[in-house]
Image (cartoon, rainbow, N blue to C red):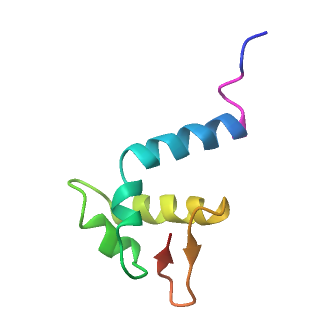
Amino acid sequence: MSENTDSPSAAIENFIAAWQASGGAAFARQSAPVTARELKEQFKNAREPKVREILQALASIGQARETEDGRYVS
């Protein structure tokens, strides 16, 4: 039986692996909570809506936390 790579859990695992390989280190290096706008400045060609979407996804799986003022912390 082959593994279903379209399942939600496989998508989450792939997302986490990609995040850790690229943006995860930049996020983890932050000494204070950051906004999506602040984090996107560390990446060439990053778009704020996509960075926000990634941060929200990380928060939904417990890999980040959103503060009351809309910032994120790892």
Quarter-of-image position of residue 68: bottom right
**Residue that protrudes farthest toward the top in the picture:** 1
The residue depicted at 71 percent of the width and 39 percent of the height is 9
Residue 11 position in % (x across, y down): 62, 38
The residue depicted at 45 percent of the width and 41 percent of the height is 18
User: Residue 64 in magenta?
Assistant: no
Identify the image quadrant of the N terminus.
top right
Q: Is residue 30 left or right of residue 20?
A: left
Q: Is residue 10 above or below residue 42?
A: above
The residue depicted at 23 percent of the width and 53 percent of the height is 45
Magenta span of residues: 4-8
Per the picture, the main secondary structure of the magenta-coloured stretch is loop
Quarter-of-image position of residue 58: bottom right
**Residue that protrudes farthest toward the bottom in the picture:** 69
Q: How many numbered circles does the render carry?
A: 0
Q: Is residue 54 above or below residue 33?
A: above
Residue 71 position in % (x across, y down): 47, 81
Q: Is residue 74 above or below residue 69?
A: above
Residue 6 position in % (x across, y down): 67, 29
The residue depicted at 56 percent of the width and 78 percent of the height is 66
**Residue that protrudes farthest toward the right in the picture:** 1
Q: Is residue 74 left or right of residue 43?
A: right
